[in-house]
Amino acid sequence: MTATVATVGMLPAALATGEGSDVQRRIATVVAGGLIPATFLTLFLIPTFYFAIERRAQARARGPLEQPA
């Protein structure tokens, strides 16, 4: 939610074409462009990674002779 609001808040600065907006546009593009992949990583990739590690740890704790439930 926070990253979405920050990205939407940077859109006017990223799309600005007025006088003096060249520096502002570059910074806003970098910030918004960084928040989009960071949000994807936080919401999808990192939880998937943790789930896979936890599943592997549980399989190792069960041992090779026990059948999965």
Image (tube, grey):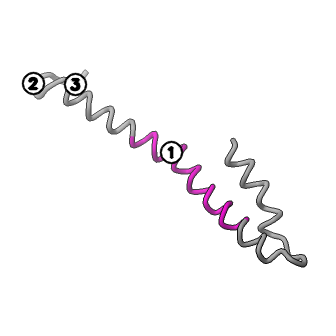
Image quarter of residue 7: bottom right
Q: Magenta segment, which residues?
A: 28-49
Marked residue nearer the N-terminal end (1 or 3)? 1
Residue 25 lies, in percent from the top left, at: 76, 71
Question: Where the N terminus falls, by quadrant?
Answer: top right
Q: Are marks 2 and 1 in contact (CB under 8 Å)?
A: no
Which element type, helix, strand or loop, lies under badge 2? Answer: loop
Of helix, strand and loop, which mostly describes the magenta segment?
helix
The disc placed on residue 65 is: 2
Amino acid type at mark 1:
Phe
Q: Is residue 25 above or below residue 52?
A: below
Q: Residue furthest right?
A: 19
Residue picked out by circle 3: 68
Residue picked out by circle 1: 44
Amino acid type at mark 2:
Leu
Residue closer to the observer: 23 or 37: 23
Residue density around tag 2, few if under 14, some if 14–19, many if 20 or more, within 10 Å: few
